[in-house]
């Protein structure tokens, strides 16, 4: 019995260690996970029109675009708003909005409003 008890006691006493590969994988997973979970406040991602240089006649359309971009019925239904400054105007107009507007089922007017909001927030406003 002592021989058996001795082996069980030794098994319990052995410390569990992570090998270098497991430790690296765990560390990388934690780092990437924390980066992916970081969120930006909506006011930073999509500034309100009072913080933008928008012509008075365009304020309503730019606000409508922000509401679509940040609201739970369209864009923000699937993801948090990305900071508009994260991408160039060209990326928004020619890549991101065409793809995302189909997914969000935006009308042409809604898509243009979102684009106007993004361009105003990035300082590259269009007249339409």
Image: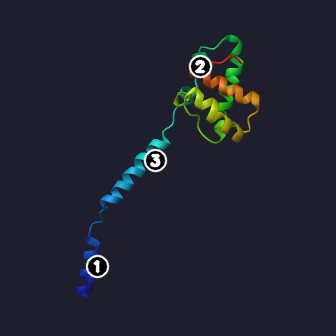
* Circle 1: element type: helix
Q: Is residue 118 left or right of residue 39?
A: right
Q: Residue at x 58, y 22 (%)?
A: 121
Foreground residue, 91 or 1? 91
Residue 125 in which image quadrant: top right
- Scheme of image coloration: rainbow
Work out whether mark 3 precedes mark 1 in sequence or the reverse, and give the earlier one: 1
**Quadrant showing the N terminus:** bottom left
Q: Which residue is mark 2?
A: 124
Q: Position of residue 81 (x, y in %)?
A: 59, 34
Q: Nearer the viewer, mark 2 or mark 1?
A: 2
User: Residue 98, how many percent across, how many down?
Assistant: 67, 35
In the image as oriented, which residue stretches furthest toward the bottom? 1
Q: CA distance from mark 3 to mark 2?
A: 33 Å
- Where in the figure is residue 116, as x and y percent of width and height? 66, 23
| Of pointers 2 and 1, the one earlier in the residue sequence | 1
**Horizontal relation, residue 3 to residue 89: left or right:** left
Does 115 sit above or below residue 80?
Answer: above
Q: CA distance from mark 2 to mark 1?
A: 71 Å
Disc 1: which residue: 8
- 111 or 13, which is in the foreground? 111
**Label 1 crowd (10 A; few <14 / some 14-19 / many >=20):** few
Q: Which residue is mark 3?
A: 33
At numbered mark 3, what does the secondary structure look like: helix, strand or loop? helix
- Whole-angstrom CA distance, mark 3 to mark 1, is 38 Å
Q: Nearer the viewer, residue 72 or 57?
A: 57
Residue 22 is left or right of residue 75, and the answer is left
**Residue lying at 23% horizontally and 81% vertically, measured from the top left:** 6
């Amino acid at each position: 019995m002592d021989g058996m008890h001795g082996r069980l006691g030794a098994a319990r006493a052995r410390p569990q260690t992570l090998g270098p590969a497991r430790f690296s994988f765990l560390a990388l997973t934690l780092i990437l996970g924390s980066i992916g979970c970081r969120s930006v406040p909506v006011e930073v991602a999509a500034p309100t029109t009072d913080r933008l240089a928008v012509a008075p006649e365009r304020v309503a359309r730019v606000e409508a675009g922000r509401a679509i971009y940040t609201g739970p019925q369209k864009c923000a239904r699937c993801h948090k708003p990305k900071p508009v400054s994260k991408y160039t105007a060209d990326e928004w107009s020619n890549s991101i909005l065409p793809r995302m507007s189909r997914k969000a089922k935006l009308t042409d007017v809604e898509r243009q409003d979102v684009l106007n909001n993004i361009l105003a927030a990035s300082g590259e406003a269009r007249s339409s």
